[in-house]
Image: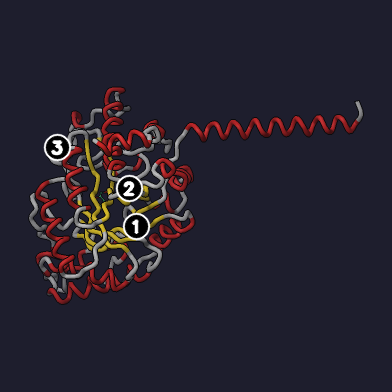
Amino acid sequence: MKKNTYYLLAICLICVLASCKNLKTDDKQAQVSVLKETFKNKFHIGVALNKQEFMGFNTKASEAIATHFNSIVAENCMKSMFLQPKEGEFFFNDADKFIGFGEKNNMHIIGHTLIWHSQAPGWFFRDKEGNDVSAEVLTQRMKNHIHTVVGRYKGRVKGWDVVNEAIEDNGEWRKSKFYQIIGKDFIKLAFQFAHEADPDAELYYNDYSMALDGRRATVVQMVKSLQEQGIRIDGIGMQGHVDMYGPSINDFEKSILAYAGLGMKVMVTELDLSVLPSPWENVGANISDAIDYQEQMNPYPAGLTENMEQQWEARYMDFFKLFLKHHDKIDRVTLWGLSDATSWKNDFPIKDRVDYPLLFDRDYNPKPIVSKFSALTNSELTALKTN
Ligand code: GLA
């Protein structure tokens, strides 16, 4: 054979090998569904990011986030105790990096959270002598905090959780410092200040156990009253810290309908489905409630049983079927974290347990359910709608 023919054969062989390699990669990608593709045209699919993830220190996690999600929220770095640890001294380094991550990946960025009784710095409510400040001073501090934070990210954050967790399970107003010092009007003021700082940003109220009758009734009243006063509010965040026992899909649906009926966009925020026994009847997320460790409360330290894994998948499916059924009312579903490895549920409300609440395992690989979601076909959805 001539030298030229050898060259030609060698080139052909390289081409064949290269196309085989591509086929292999394509095959692999075809097997794992991508969440944001599965839920495209239905709702945004979001995730809460910790510092390792938005700084890029955990590359596997950051890549999975960029591949699967189109919305992000900061797990901690935008809470007031981190953004303004001392009066007038703002710390934006982490939040800037978080926003940068979202912009680089073309994501829908959510700001969490402006006014919350928890994870707020102590100085916010006290004067130099340690006494509660007056309503005027607290209002001024709220205004300054909200204007500075929202103003900094004006036009870059799609929507803000303006007020977090102002109402109790039974529908009473939480007796937070904001409520004690200013009264119910702190809600209205917070929304007004946020709107002044970025007139184009969407504004949300966010709370846990939002499927409870008492909380639902008061949230509905609160939204109506804001609307009557001409205050901008765009959406309601239903935190989804759920477990195997509650809430029921029915109760969750009642709340989606109630909030959407007010013209609110519904966001399922902070979704995680715990498999662990709960020391309470109603699972909440009051992070100051901690309970002592007992072995029987940590039943799966070395992995889930097959049976529990199936039950967990089935319940997650039920929730997602509900979200898909009401996708015209639901704007976003956000998981409270990427991987079981770093979920807060391992430590709440009992420290040092092993929980499995998220869609990615401890090695940051998607769990089988991620691909199973894409099997919820359009025809199944149509069937659900007509039920
Ligand atoms: C609440 C808050 C979140 C987070 C969780 C626990 O739900 O809204 O910011 O602190 O508790 O991780």
- Mark 1–mark 2 Cα distance, whole angstroms, equals 10 Å
* Amino acid tagged 1: Ile
Between residues 177 and 167, which one lies in front from this camera angle?
167
- Mark 3–mark 1 Cα distance, whole angstroms, equals 31 Å
Label 3, residues with CA under 10 Å away: few <14, some 14-19, many ≥20:
few
Between residues 9 and 244, which one lies in front from this camera angle?
9
Label 2, residues with CA under 10 Å away: few <14, some 14-19, many ≥20:
many
Label 1, residues with CA under 10 Å away: few <14, some 14-19, many ≥20:
many
Circle 2: element type: strand
Using the image, tell me which numbered label, if any, was put on residue 99. none
Using the image, tell me which numbered label, if any, was put on residue 110. 1
* Amino acid tagged 2: Thr
Circle 3: element type: loop
Q: Where residue 42 appears, x then y in whole percent?
A: 36, 46
Q: Which residue is mark 3?
A: 279
* Amino acid tagged 3: Pro
**N-term-proximal mark, 3 vs 1:** 1
**N-term-proximal mark, 1 vs 2:** 1
Residue 349 visible within the image: yes
Q: Which residue is mark 2?
A: 334
